[in-house]
Image (cartoon, rainbow, N blue to C red):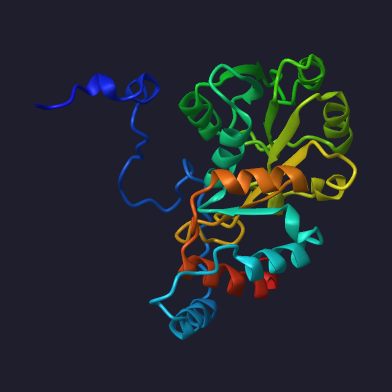
Amino acid sequence: MKPPVELVREAIRQRKLYTLPRGKYIAKLNQNENPYEVPDSIKEEILREIKRKSWNRYPDLAYSELKEEIAEWQKVAKERIVIGNGSNEVLFSIMFTLLSKGDELVSISPSFSMFENFSSLIEARTTYLRLKKGNFSFPVEDIEERAASGKYKLILLCSPNNPTSNTLSRDELVRILESAKGYVLVDEAYVDFCNQDFKKLIDDYDNLILTRTFSKAFSFPFGRFGYGILPVELAREVVKAQLPYNLNGMTETAVRVLIKNRKVFG
């Protein structure tokens, strides 16, 4: 007997499959891929390091050395670092850790499409606040009001915002952080392309979460790597929600080489 498809969760059955147009393009603006390749010399160094590894062994379960190198580079505590198979996985892991069915969060529109995908998968309820007409600036007062209400576990923002490229100012983010009763997550996928870095606020605000990726400035979407800088207590919980060995050893090795050569990427 064939089991009925109705056994599949309704939230899954109602979703559309995530797809992309196929073809060869000079510039793929839908994914914002870097047009510049990783230099051959760095690719060769990556391949040499991968060859040195024991392929019949699992990678380090805790990815300790990689986390230490990220922490040293970003000048934050190692215990704050959460890594994943792209920043998408880090984002989803955080949302999955914090949100249950029916929980509420706030985000902006238009913004990164995965925010909606992940919240609908978890069956959380999202309130979307429109960017202001004309200059696409953030509706900071509206965000503050909702953040202060205590109704929302998570405020989900993107700065620089995808697709509008505008950024939150430091003062605007501080206002939101000081109003919020829950966590404030800022997706900083494009942080390397602007002069605004919120990392210095991490030690002052225990409700601030930052996520970053190697897919843009480091030209490495092929390897799928992202990381988050979280409050230590939350980082401990998020790791519990991730699958063991969520990052393959080849990507881990490649990322460590890229970090060592980070000055090449600006």
> How far from the left and from the top, in percent, is residue 226?
58, 53
The residue nearer to you, when weighing 139 against 128, is 128
Residue 81 located left or right of residue 38: right
Q: Is residue 178 above or below residue 66?
A: above
Q: Quadrant of residue 241?
A: top right
Which residue appears at 65% of the width and 18% of the height? 130
- Answer with left or right where residue 204 lies relative to residue 165: right
- Vertical side of 21 occupied by 252: above or below: below
Percent across and percent down for residue 25 are 38, 51
Q: Residue at x 65, y 67 (%)?
A: 64
Q: Check the picture and name the quadrant holding the N terminus.
A: top left
The image quarter in which residue 78 lies: bottom right
Which residue appears at 36% of the width and 40% of the height? 20
Answer with left or right where residue 233 lies relative to residue 110.
Answer: right
Q: From what the image shows, is residue 42 above or below residue 188?
A: below
Of residues 22 and 47, the one nearer the viewer is: 47
| 152 left or right, relative to 206 | left
